[in-house]
């Protein structure tokens, strides 16, 4: 089934902009006027990345420029040891939005990709960039089913070597906070050869355009947000924990950074931009931000994929979700994974609740093995939902998920002594309006079918530091969440 929303417009990055009175530069055949949003359209050739964009300052911004040094001093023992092997410690106890649902078998057209930049010593990134630049320009698929294209011959990256490169590029920054993998109360470490754990990461990585141009982190030096180094901090966090599934929000460097790098590390991926991304309001933006889902090719194959534009009160909104049903190569069992990012800011609680209800209805349809039967007793595919919900546990959308017929539980409640309390925060930032310390990010899982084996703990206030997030030592205003889950034994398998 072809997505009607996709068909309505040409394949420009921001279809909504083009939809309204054809008011984009491509349709008028001229450059944008002051105050207008500037968009690159995949259907037309992109200019040389070393040339200034129309309407931008004349000076070129070289992709090969070396990383700027942060005045935070060298990474030293005083800043804490760099942590690559996490330790383990014990602790106390209404209608479905516009969508595309399909069984995936087709490949993804190669995407137009540019070098990541970095210093001349950036050997792996340089090798990858050469491989990408040797390919002809191609139109990115806004609705990729599986990537990379089998015809895209990317150099395979050694994750250990890339991790060392990240460390080298970040020598002048303090180390990231040390975080331990923690067993929930009452759980003991176990390893089953035939049912190994699945490591899942959830992270709002902070869109580059928003961090530099809109979010107003008044205690974070602008140099700490410089992409030439911040990208290494993000990749370092991912490479440290080697997740099997990665769910990201606020991704505005998908095609030029995360898709090619993660593909070369052995991940397939999918990206869905917001229809009206606030990143496009920022001069020299890198395109719209959106959600991205990555899974390890050696562990999973793609069974089905859905791209959702969430609705509220039967009206489409600016928020999206990716839902993919994966087949585990080890167990042969299916796992449905969803990533979303709900509406931000206070005053929008009712909209978030409606978006959550729409997403839950879609997930009930997608996970039902009976083809969408509403009977709650029918067999369903186990589900993991990751997202920045922009909602505290007191909000209605949180209650909708806890009371859903899908049987979802929040993994990070297991870090508490009673197993019933969320962490005190997953984001901590200081803006002109004041300091905000909130729990907004969650990993939900089907409790009857999945178990949580361990979780990555939350950094302390001291580790985060007085200037909060983001900072020289942490790249986002949101903390990454990570847990190991495994399939529970099905009754018929025990007989």
Image (spheres, rainbow, N blue to C red):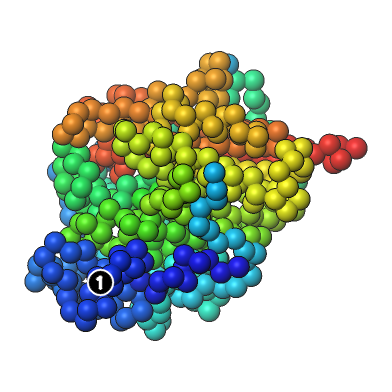
Residue 232 in view here: no
Image quarter where the N terminus lies is bottom right
Residue 13 rendering spot, x and y as whole percentages:
35, 67
Q: Is residue 378 above or below residue 404?
A: below
Q: Residue furthest bottom?
A: 136
Of 455 and 164, nearer the camera is 455
Would you name the residue on which mark 1 appears? 24
Residue at screen point 73% across, 47% down: 373
- Left or right side of 263 for 210: left
- Kindly indicate the quadrant of the structure image that contains residue 446: top right
Q: Residue furthest left?
A: 58
Regarding mark 1 in the picture, which secondary structure is present there?
A: loop
- Left or right side of 101 for 190: right
Of 432 and 35, nearer the camera is 35
Image quarter where the C terminus lies is top right
Residue 418 rendering spot, x and y as whole percentages:
56, 15
Residue at screen point 34% across, 68% down: 19
Residue 274 rendering spot, x and y as whole percentages:
38, 56
Residue at screen point 65% across, 37% down: 406
Residue 37 in view here: yes
- Left or right side of 355 for 24: left
Q: Is residue 304 above or below residue 234?
A: below
Q: Is residue 197 above or below residue 38?
A: above
- Kindly indicate the quadrant of the structure image that contains residue 11: bottom left
């Amino acid at each position: 089934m072809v997505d009607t929303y996709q068909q309505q417009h040409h394949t420009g990055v921001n279809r909504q902009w083009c939809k309204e009175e054809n008011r984009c530069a491509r349709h008028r055949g001229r450059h944008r006027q002051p105050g207008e949003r500037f968009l690159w359209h995949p259907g037309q050739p992109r200019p040389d990345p070393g040339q200034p964009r129309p309407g931008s300052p004349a000076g070129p911004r070289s992709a090969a420029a070396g990383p700027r040094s942060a005045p935070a001093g060298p990474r030293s023992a005083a800043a804490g040891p760099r942590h690559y092997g996490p330790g383990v410690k014990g602790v106390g106890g209404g209608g479905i939005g516009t969508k595309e649902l399909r069984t995936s078998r087709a490949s993804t057209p190669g995407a137009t990709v540019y070098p990541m930049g970095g210093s001349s010593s950036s050997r792996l990134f340089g090798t990858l960039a050469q491989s990408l630049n040797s390919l002809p320009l191609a139109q990115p698929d806004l609705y990729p089913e599986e990537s990379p294209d089998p015809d895209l011959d990317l150099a395979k990256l050694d994750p250990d070597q890339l991790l060392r490169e990240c460390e080298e590029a970040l020598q002048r920054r303090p180390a990231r906070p040390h975080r331990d993998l923690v067993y929930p109360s009452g759980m003991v470490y176990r390893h089953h050869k035939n049912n190994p754990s699945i490591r899942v990461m959830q992270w709002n990585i902070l869109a580059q355009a928003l961090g530099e141009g809109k979010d107003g982190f008044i205690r974070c030096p602008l140099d700490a947000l410089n992409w030439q180094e911040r990208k290494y901090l993000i990749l370092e966090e991912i490479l440290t924990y080697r997740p099997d599934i990665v769910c990201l929000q606020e991704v505005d460097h998908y095609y030029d950074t995360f898709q090619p790098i993660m593909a070369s590390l052995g991940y397939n991926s999918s990206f869905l931009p917001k229809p009206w991304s606030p990143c496009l309001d920022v001069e020299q933006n890198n395109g719209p931000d959106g959600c991205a889902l990555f899974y390890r090719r050696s562990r999973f194959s793609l069974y089905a994929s859905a791209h959702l534009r969430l609705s509220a009160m039967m009206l489409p909104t600016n928020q999206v979700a990716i839902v993919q049903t994966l087949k585990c190569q080890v167990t042969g069992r299916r796992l449905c994974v969803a990533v979303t990012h709900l509406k931000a800011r206070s005053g929008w609680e009712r909209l978030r609740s409606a978006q959550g209800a729409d997403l839950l209805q879609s997930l009930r349809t997608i996970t039902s093995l009976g083809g969408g039967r509403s009977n709650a007793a029918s067999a369903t595919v186990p589900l993991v939902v990751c997202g920045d919900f922009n909602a505290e546990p007191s909000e209605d959308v949180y209650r909708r998920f806890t009371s859903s017929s899908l049987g979802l539980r929040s993994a990070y409640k297991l870090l508490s002594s009673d197993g019933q309390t969320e962490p005190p925060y997953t984001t901590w930032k200081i803006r002109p309006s004041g300091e905000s310390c909130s729990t907004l990010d969650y990993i939900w899982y089907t409790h009857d079918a999945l178990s949580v084996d361990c979780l990555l703990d939350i950094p302390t206030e001291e580790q985060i530091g007085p200037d909060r997030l983001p900072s020289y030592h942490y790249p986002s205003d949101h903390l990454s969440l990570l847990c190991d889950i495994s399939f529970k034994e099905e009754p018929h398998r025990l007989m």
